[in-house]
Image: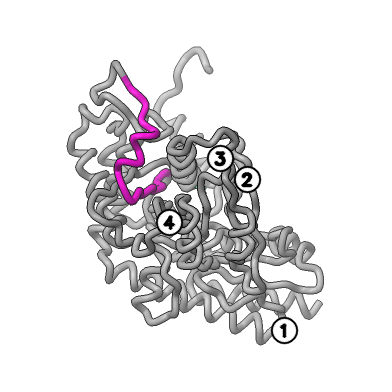
Amino acid sequence: MRVKGLPEKDVLVKLQQARLRDLRYEDGKILCSMCTNPHPAAKQAHKMFLEANLGDAGLFPGSVQLEREAVASLAELLHAPEGGGGFIVSGGTEANLLALYAARNASKVASPEVVVPESAHFSFDKVCDLLRLKILKAKLDTSFRVDPASVEELINENTVAVVGNAGSAELGTVDPIDALSKIAVECGVPLHVDAAFGGLFVPFLKELGYTTPEFDFVLDGIQSITVDPHKMGMSTIPAGGILFRSSKTWECIKTATPYLTEPNQCTFVGTRPAASAAAAWAVFESLGREGFKKAVADCMDVTNYLYEGLEEAGFEVLLRPPMNIVAFRSADSKMLASKLRSRGWHVSYVPRLDCIRLVLMPHTTKKHAAEFLLYLGKLKAK
Ligand SMILES: Cc1ncc(COP(=O)(O)O)c(C=O)c1O
């Protein structure tokens, strides 16, 4: 650290210089991110709650109220029954961590194991390592969704939880959660659904007439769901969401906080930004279901346009997009991804599937998609 502080204007110049090196969502070249430009109401709310700390809740009752209301909106959307609840946390990773932490602590198993789909987000590898859970990966079927028979085969007396995706990170697939729920009930293990990405998308797809499988608390076996405001919730970072069917579950993950204004905490992170909870609340209030439905419709418009364009151009598209992710292959997908990136088009390459993955968030317009297709066409012709 420097000995003598700089004048504010010099600090600002340095900040601006750093910021200018960052990419901007609005330029339309970020095609690989599950985050987006926050809604204006989220930015405003975030600024208003900068110093408020949900980790010392007694000092910030207004912030606590906003977190409760934001969680209640998510719970209502995902049909959580009375008596449930949750938290706005740092992201999908922490939400998945809390779900498995609760499942592990609720069980009396000495060598606990968790069954996840092969397509589960890598956060489960981190979480299982931290919690000393053995992770078993179930096979997928030809539509890239987990095969319930494979899940069933992996369940044994050590299983403390089963995980399903509702909007997998790589392809946006929704696993057969209804089948997983039945298995979970039969085997007496909790089912956790990772809807970090899909939780604020799939319900609106359904309203738009797309066929989507059930994935939320209407299914008995589901005990917890991850659903992140900082992804399709268009909120500010960091804002993940964890919902539990029953608030009794979080008794297993409570830690006493003797010197704070609240007697205990259930989240992993201690000092927590109320700014993110306020931002999520502000988006829910500003958009309402109608606003979300429109955002989802717009994303699907761009997604379907790209899907059709890629097919027309002769690329192998892995599947009809179940949500706003398109995955495709060329003769050398890895090389193509790296060429695109070097020319400023930020796409992901997924080694497991040897494909290029595009995520069409609200910042990507049809015009951007058309430019991308044009560019791809030129590269292909070379
Ligand atoms: C399905 C899914 N789960 C979990 C995560 C982890 O979320 P975060 O990066 O917010 O911790 C992601 C991130 O993209 C995700 O797509």
Examine the rendering and report whether any part of residue 26 can be seen.
Answer: no
Q: Could you tell me how far apart the alpha carbons at marks 3 and 1 are, in whole angstroms? A: 40 Å
Residue at 58% in and 43% down: 158
Give the numbered dot on residue 135.
Answer: 2
Q: Residues within 10 Å of mark 3 (few under 14, many from 20)?
A: many
Instruction: Please name the amino acid that badge 1 sits on.
Output: Gly
Question: Element at badge 2?
Answer: strand
Task: Report the amino acid beneath label 3.
Answer: Val
- Between marks 3 and 1 in the image, the one whose residue lies nearer the viewer: 3
Give residue 301's position: percent from left, percent from top: 46, 78
Task: Please state, as top left, top right, bottom left or bottom right, where the C terminus lies in the image.
Answer: bottom right
Give the residue pinned by disc 3: 127
The magenta stretch is 238-257
Residue 329 vertical position relative to residue 114 in the rendered view, above or below: below
Return the disc, 1 or 2, that comes first in the chain's sequence.
2
Measuring from the top left, give residue 27's x and y in whole percent: 52, 62
Which residue in the protein does label 4 denote? 37
Residue at position x 27%, y 59% from top? 76
Which numbered disc, 4 or 2, marks the residue closer to the eye?
2
Q: Quadrant of residue 73?
A: bottom left
Q: Is residue 58 above or below residue 348?
A: above
Q: Which residue is mark 1?
A: 314
Helix, strand or loop for disc 4: loop
Q: Is residue 96 magenta?
A: no
